[in-house]
Structure formats: C-alpha cells, structure tokens
C-alpha cells in the first residue's frame, strides 16, 4: 500500500519540474554558444530568467495540488490514495526547491562540465540509496520521500556551487 502512495506522490511531483527540463533542453545550445563567445553576463542573465520561469511554473502547478490535495487525489485516484498526501507534500517542497535552481544541470553540461555533473549525480544516487534504506526501515514510504528530497537538494546545491566556482574562475581569467 505504501509503495503505491510513494509511486503516486513521485509521479505527481515530477510535473513540477517539467518546465525546468523543457527550458533547459530548449536553451542548452544557447548556453553553450554564449559561453564559448565569452558572454558570461548573458549566460547569467539567461539562467536567472529561466530559474524565475521554472520556479513560477512549479509554484503555479503546486498551488492547486496543495490547496485541493484531498479533493484531487480522491477524484483522480480514489480515497484509498489519501495516504499519499504527506509524501506528496514532501516531494512537492523538494520539487519547488529543485525548480529554484532552474536548468543548472543543463547549463553545466552545455559548457563542458559533464564529468563533474556525472560525479555529483552518482554521489546523489548513493546518498539516496543509503538514506532510503535507513529511513524506509524507520518510517516507511515517508522515509523514501525524505531521502529522495534530501538527495535531490544535495545534487542541485552541489551543481549550483560548481556554477559559482566556474563563474569566479571565468571572471578571474
């Protein structure tokens, strides 16, 4: 039963980051060309705009899910899935935080930092698995949601720190 709750919460929460993924894919080539041309200010401005758009889209999507969570879940999936609400709230908070960073992963991949992104993704996956094993045994599916959220926030924060480092190095050159 809890597995079904977790699956539903994950699937509903993924909708929040769809805009960020689409924006990142749409502007990946633009990031690369601006960076190659040495237009760091333009890259920063574009990333900021995309972060704002991603966050606005996530908040707009999350709003009805938070405001009408019981009604929507009952209507769409049945009252037997109301147990997914706490998991959904944890994952929605994570996805909103994720959208705040916008398409930072796509940006780093586009400007030649694929290896760093891969390493941090692997670290995040290891963190997720370890935390999921521990927390799931303690608090069930809610532990899975918390572990997923923590590993995801770790990933985006590490990518953001790398972006700051890359920008500092670029301005010093």
Image: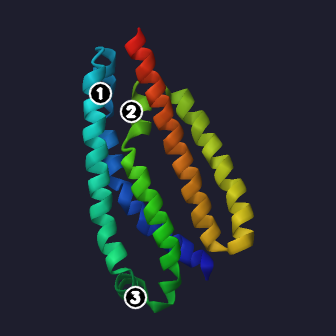
Image disc number at residue 107: 2
Across and down, in percent, residue 45 comes to 25, 31
Can residue 112 be seen here? The reply is no
124 lies left or right of 160: right
Q: Are marks 1 and 2 in contact (CB under 8 Å)?
A: yes
Does residue 164 lie above or below 60 as drawn?
above
- Disc 1 and disc 2: Cα gap in Å? 9 Å
Number of other residues with Cα within 10 Å of mark 3, as a class: few under 14, some 14 to 19, many 20 or more: some
The colour scheme used to paint the residues is rainbow
Residue at the limit of the structure toward the bottom, as seen here:
79
| Residue wearing tag 1 | 43
Q: Where is residue 70 in the image (x, y as percent from the top left)?
A: 39, 85
Whether 15 is drawn above or below 78: the answer is above
Write the residue at 31% across / 61% down: 59
Screen quadrant of the C terminus: top left
Which callout, 1 or 2, points to the residue nearer the camera? 1
Q: Distance between the residues labelled 2 and 3?
A: 39 Å
* Label 1 secondary element: helix
167 left or right of 122 in image:
left
Element type at mark 3: helix
């Amino acid at each position: 039963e809890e597995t079904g709750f977790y699956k539903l919460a994950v699937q509903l929460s993924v909708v929040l980051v769809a805009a960020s993924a689409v924006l990142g894919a749409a502007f990946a080539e633009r990031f690369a060309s601006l960076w190659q041309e040495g237009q760091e200010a333009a890259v920063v401005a574009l990333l900021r705009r995309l972060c704002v758009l991603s966050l606005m889209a996530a908040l707009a999507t999350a709003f009805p899910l938070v405001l009408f969570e019981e009604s929507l879940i009952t209507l769409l999936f049945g009252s037997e899935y109301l147990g997914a609400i706490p998991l959904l709230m944890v994952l929605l908070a994570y996805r909103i935080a994720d959208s705040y960073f916008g398409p930072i992963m796509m940006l780093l991949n586009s400007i030649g930092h694929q290896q760093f992104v891969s390493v941090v993704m692997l670290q995040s996956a290891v963190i997720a698995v370890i935390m999921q094993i521990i927390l799931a045994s303690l608090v069930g599916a809610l532990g899975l949601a918390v572990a997923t959220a923590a590993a995801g926030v770790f990933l985006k924060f590490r990518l953001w720190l790398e972006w700051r480092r890359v920008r500092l190095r670029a301005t010093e050159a």
